[in-house]
Image (cartoon, rainbow, N blue to C red):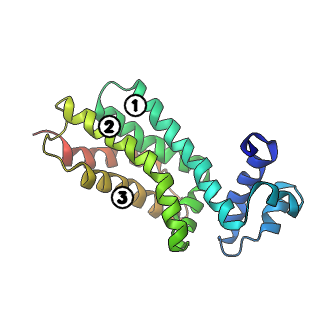
């Protein structure tokens, strides 16, 4: 499996930096190769083209969010706590990697429809875990019983995503992780059982 080859991760990490610094459209494969310290041809042993690199970057990095969230679900006692840790964990991943934040919040949005569909299918796994948190909250009597899970998922993810994008647009000048308690409080008020 190519993912186990050491250069694969090297190229993925280099791509995040190059795409963040130059924008997706200006991020030539040769720049990515140079950043990764490999020959241009080496990239094509791992990826079909630049689009394949971007999809692979998203797939690899999204697994950080998914793995975090799976751990949170296993280790948390209440759905409310899971939701808080999800928000905080999402913000932490982005605040610890500024290049990744630029790529996920800005560069992926500028891609074509076909690319966006592929990105959305990768995102599904993360959103399924959010659904799991919401269902646990309903079952435990923490959240409203008649909640529209699909709509609530969109509101929660949309809020996390928008707060993250605004932070990137403001050149990451403030502490994103510090926003987690307030975001959690606002979202919780909308879904808590009265």
| Label annotation for residue 73 | 1
**Residues tagged 2 and 1 counted as in contact (Cβ below 8 A):** yes
Marks 2 and 1, how far apart at CA = 7 Å
Quarter of the C terminus within the rendering: top left
The residue carrying pointer 3 sits among few (fewer than 14), some (14 to 19) or many (20 or more) residues within 10 Å by Cα, namely few
Is residue 169 visible in the rendered image? The answer is: no
Q: Position of residue 177 (x, y in %)?
A: 46, 45
Q: Secondary structure at mark 2?
A: helix
**Chain-order first, disc 3 or disc 1:** 1
Q: Secondary structure at mark 1?
A: helix
Position of residue 157 relative to residue 192, above or below, is below
The residue carrying pointer 1 sits among few (fewer than 14), some (14 to 19) or many (20 or more) residues within 10 Å by Cα, namely many
Q: Secondary structure at mark 3?
A: helix
Residue at figure coordinates x 51%, y 69% from the top left:
109
* Relative to 120, 131 lies left or right: left
* Relative to 85, 115 lies left or right: right
**Chain-order first, disc 2 or disc 1:** 1
Tell me the quarter of the picture where residue 23 sits.
bottom right
The residue carrying pointer 2 sits among few (fewer than 14), some (14 to 19) or many (20 or more) residues within 10 Å by Cα, namely many
* Relative to 81, 116 lies left or right: right
Residue at figure coordinates x 24%, y 48% from the top left:
149
Quarter of the N terminus within the rendering: top right
Q: Position of residue 32 (x, y in %)?
A: 78, 62
Is residue 3 visible in the rendered image? The answer is: yes
Q: Which residue is mark 3?
A: 158
**Chain-order first, disc 2 or disc 3:** 2
Q: Which residue is mark 2?
A: 133
Q: Position of residue 24 (x, y in %)?
A: 65, 70
Q: Residue furthest left?
A: 194
Marks 2 and 3, how far apart at CA = 16 Å
């Amino acid at each position: 499996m190519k993912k186990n080859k050491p250069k694969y991760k090297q190229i993925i990490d280099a791509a995040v930096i190059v795409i963040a610094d130059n924008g997706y459209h200006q991020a030539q494969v040769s720049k990515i190769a140079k950043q990764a310290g490999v020959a241009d041809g080496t990239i094509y042993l791992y990826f079909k083209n630049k689009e394949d690199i971007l999809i692979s970057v998203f797939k690899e990095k999204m697994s950080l969010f998914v793995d975090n969230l799976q751990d949170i679900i296993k280790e948390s006692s209440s759905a409310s706590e899971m939701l808080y840790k999800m928000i905080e964990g999402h913000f932490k991943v982005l605040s610890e990697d500024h290049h990744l934040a630029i790529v996920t919040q800005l560069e992926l949005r500028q891609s074509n429809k076909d690319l966006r569909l592929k990105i959305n299918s990768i995102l599904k796994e993360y959103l399924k875990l959010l659904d799991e948190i919401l269902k646990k909250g309903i079952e435990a009597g923490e959240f409203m019983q008649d909640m529209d899970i699909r709509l609530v998922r969109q509101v929660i993810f949309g809020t996390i995503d928008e707060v993250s994008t605004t932070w990137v647009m403001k050149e990451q000048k403030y502490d994103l992780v510090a926003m987690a308690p307030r975001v959690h409080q606002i979202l919780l008020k909308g879904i808590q059982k009265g």
